[in-house]
Image (tube, rainbow, N blue to C red):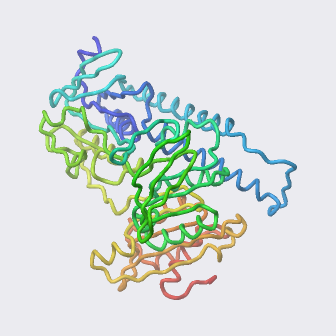
Amino acid sequence: MSRESVVYDVAIIGSGPGGYVAAIKASQLGLKVALIEKYSKVGGTCLHWGCIPTKALLLNADLYEKALHGKEFGILYKDINLDFRLVKARKDKIVKKLAMGTDFLMKKNKVAIYQGIGSISAPDTIQVSGEAPAEVKAKKIVIATGSEAKLLPGMELDGQCILTNKEILDLDSVPKSLLVVGAGAVGIEFASIFSRFGTDVTVVEMLPRILPLEDNEVSEELRKILTRRRIKIMTNARLENLTVQDGKVQATLSVEGAPAQVISAEKALIGVGRRPVSEGLGLEQLGVATTRGFIPVDEHMETSVPGIFAIGDVVPTQQLAHLASHEGILAVRHIAGEKTEPLNYDLVPSCTYCSPEVSSVGLTENAARERGFEVVTSKFPFAAIGKATILGENDGFVKLVCEKKYKQVLGIHMIGPHVTELIAEGTAIIGLEACAEDVSHLIHAHPTVSEGIMEAAHAIYGAAIHF
C-alpha cells in the first residue's frame, strides 16, 4: 500500500515543539499520524533558530563572563580569548544532536513524515508541494505552522547588516556594535549575549519599558542592571528609518521629548515580535476564521471548521514553545476521544534567559488589580541569599503577588540566578492554589537560590528571616 492511499487519523502541518510533540502524543494514543514539514529537518524555529541555539550562545556568554572575572574566584588565566568560530561550532553541534534525537522520536513513534509545503484543499485533504508532491488524507488536521519574525513597515532585510533572530545565528564573528530594535525576550537575550562577548549594544524600544509583558518592578530592575553593564537602553523611542550605508546600519530614531537622532552600528537585529504563519494554507477557501493572521480556537484547540485544529504561535495565545507543546497534546487527546480540561493560561510560565535571568507565572501586580483583587505584594532580594552570594550573582529578587484576605498566591515574578529553573515551583504553587503561609512552611534546602521563594512568602507577613 502506497503512502498516498493511507488515510491517517490525524495530519499535522508543522514540526515545531507544537507539531512534533502532538505527533508523538497522537501516536502514543494509538492514532495513525502524518507530519508535514516544509524544511528538510524536523524541530521548527525553536530547535533550529530559536530556543536551543540562543540558549547555547547564552551559556557561552556566561562562561566567558565568568572567565573574565576569574580572579574573584581565585582562578587566574594568562590569556583569555573568545574564539567565536568554536562558539558557533558548539551551538551547531548541539542543534544537530537534538535534531537527530527528534528524528529518532518520529521513527520510534511511527510518524510518517512528508517534506514540503502543506495546503489544506478540503477538511480531510492536504496537498504537499515540493520535490516529492503528495496528497495526504486525514480524518483530522492540526495546523502547527508557528510564527516568523515581524518586520516594521517598509523595512527590508539584507541578511548581512539588518538581521532577524535567524540570520544573527549565522554570524562568523562578533560585531563591534549592535543595534537591537525591540526589547522583548528575543531582543534582550541577544543584547545580553553580544554585550558580554564585547559588542557595544544599544537597545531601542517604542514602549515605556523593556520586557513590557513582565511585572513593572522586574522590568525596571533589569533595566538598571543592564545599564550598569554598559548596555544603552532607549525606551519611548520610535525607529523612523533604517538604512545600510558603506556597510553599516544607519538608524534614525525619534525619542519622546527629544529631537530625532541618528545611530550608527555594524549590525541591527530586528526583534519587534513575531507574526503567525497562516498564509497559503487555504484557510479562506475552507471558511476557517482568522484574525490578523491568527486562528481563533475553542477550548479543544478546534477552529471554526470542525475537524481542523490549530496550536502554538499561529493561535492568539502566548508565543511560547512549551505552551505550543501542551496545546498540541490537548488537541490530539481530544481527537483521540479522551476527556480533557481547557488549559489554564494563567499557569503558563514565561522565561527570558538574559543575565540575570527573568521568569514569571501567574498575574502581575497590575493584572491582579485589573481583575478586581485586593492585592498585597512582597519582595525578597537575592543579595540576602547565601547561594546567590556563592555564585557571585546577587542581583535581583523574588516578588510575590497575593490576594489580601487569605494571601493566596496569584503571581510569582523573579529576576536573578537560575530563576528560569525556579519558576516550575511557582507554577506548582499557583496551580495548587497555595497561600503564602503554605509556601513559607515548605522546607527549602540550604543553601539554594530557591530559598528566595520561601523568604518572599515569609515577607508577605512582614516576617522574612534573613532580611
Q: Using residue 79 as the reference point, say whether residue 439 is left or right of it.
A: left
Please count the marks in the image. 0
Q: Residue pushed farthest bottom?
A: 462
Please give the name of the residue rendered at 32% of the width and 78% of the height, measured from the top-left corner: 369
Q: Using residue 313 as the reference point, say whether residue 418 is left or right of it.
A: right
295 relative to 385, above or below: above
Quadrant into which the C terminus falls: bottom right
Percent across and percent down for residue 400 are 46, 75
Residue 40 sits in quarter: top left
Please give the name of the residue rendered at 34% of the width and 32% of the height, measured from the top-left corner: 27
Q: Which of 232 and 16 is in front in this view?
A: 232
Percent across and percent down for residue 399 are 49, 74
Q: Is residue 428 visible?
A: no
Residue 373 sits in quarter: bottom left
Please give the name of the residue rendered at 33% of the width and 72% of the height, measured from the top-left corner: 367
Percent across and percent down for residue 17 are 41, 41
Q: Can residue 98 be seen in this view?
A: yes
Please give the name of the residue rendered at 49% of the width and 42% of the height, measured from the top-left corner: 244
